[in-house]
Amino acid sequence: MRICARHLISLATGCALALGVLAMPAAAATTPAVTLAATPTTVAIGQAVTLYGHVRPRQGGQAVKIVDQDGRVRARPTTNSEGKYRVAFDPRQSMSLHAEWKDVKSPSVRLRVRAVLSVRLGGVLLFGTAVARGKVRPIVRGARVQVTLIRGYTPVARRMARMTALGKFKTGFRVAKPGFYRVRATFDDADHLPGKALSSGARTPLPDLRAGSRGPIVGLLERRLVALHYRVAGVDQHFDYRTADAVMAFRKVQGLPRVGTVNSKVWLKLASPRVPKARLRTKGRHVEVNQSLQVLYVVYGGKITYIIHVSTGKPSTPTRDGSFRVWSKQVGFSPKHLYYPSFFDGQRAIHGWTEVPPYAASHGCVRIPYWNAIWMFGLDPVGTRVLVYH
């Protein structure tokens, strides 16, 4: 049989094309490749991530490198007989990873790592300092932790605390109002997702106090009275007769029952008090006696600097309203047994006395507690104006 040359060339060409088509899948299957996946991709610091993937062609015993965005090798898993690999990884910060095998790389996988915090709140005494303490992971010495004081459900103060080399932080908040308090701590930086922690709550105690009470909460009471210009002899954490007199003066100004003890109503008023104002706005020092409230104000530059409990004249022997000046003073006792008197209206004087009831009970003078007498004597020299009013 005769076959022309042209037919032979066509046959050879067709065979070559057929062989090429058959060879293409085999060539493609041998192209090296590597994959990388992670689960989960968002974790809290200290939580492990599983990294997994496979190589192609599928081969066992192949070393795969897991590399971060800075070129550091983070893990070196080996493939199993199916060409797969799996490795646990503990990321300490957010990062991107890719797998390398032979001369090929996988697409990158992004891991997000959240900071972990703990925080607790110390005692929340009214007018005291509540201390918040906590820890953070990761430890970033000198980094700032935001700490927020929450009263009820309302943030009332915020501080930035520095982290120590041990990952600890501490800050304090003044407790200005009674209520239920917690603190929230937040740490956030470029390498981590924000981490938050909320402390357990604590309520400000509002204890009853009276003469004989002692302790830090008495000291807080005394400091608050001093801050509001009520005369206290010393902040000594001891509720004595002097503290009781200051409480009496405070109760009078606030319109509370006139006794020298503290209860929850007093604490609430201490947090949101009525602040009296001087009647006379002049330079220098003068004295005002408010007979309606039965208190005395020492005023300097138009501002009340001290408030003390007094007793003025009873209805049968009243203390006259008006503007007077101290005209005479006597060290020690007067012939009528007035203690360190400063006379301002005839024989009417500001003086110490053994009994100073919460109501008008004198013979026309302004009685003040004995322990205040010498102190007051030094503040109202001859010529000092004394304004008396209802």
Image (spheres, helix red, strand yellow):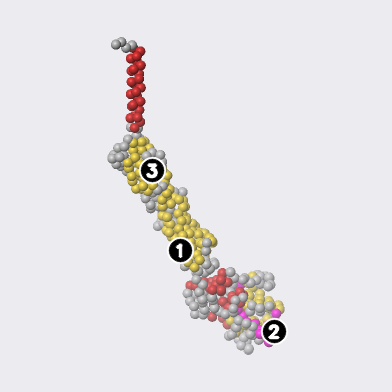
Q: Is residue 268 above or below residue 77?
A: below
Q: Is mark 3 on a helix, strand or loop?
A: strand
Q: Residue at x 50, y 74 (%)?
A: 207
Q: Which circle marks residue 200 in the picture?
A: 1
Residue labelled with disc 2: 346
Q: Looking at the picture, which amino acid does disc 1 mark?
A: Ser
Residue labelled with disc 3: 37
- The picture quadrant where one finds residue 257 is bottom right
Q: Nearer the viewer, mark 3 or mark 1?
A: 3
Observer-nearest of 297 and 329: 297
Q: Is mark 1 on a helix, strand or loop?
A: loop
Q: Looking at the picture, which amino acid does disc 2 mark?
A: Gly
**Disc 3 and disc 1: Cα gap in Å?**
39 Å
Indicate which disc, 3 or 2, sits on the residue closer to the N terminus: 3
107 is within the stretch colored magenta = no
Query: Can residue 375 be seen here?
Result: no
Is the magenta region chiefly helix, strand or loop?
loop
Q: Looking at the picture, which amino acid does disc 3 mark?
A: Ala
Query: Can residue 293 be seen here?
Result: yes
Q: Residue at x 54, y 80 (%)?
A: 241
Q: What stretch is highlighted in magenta?
A: 305-321
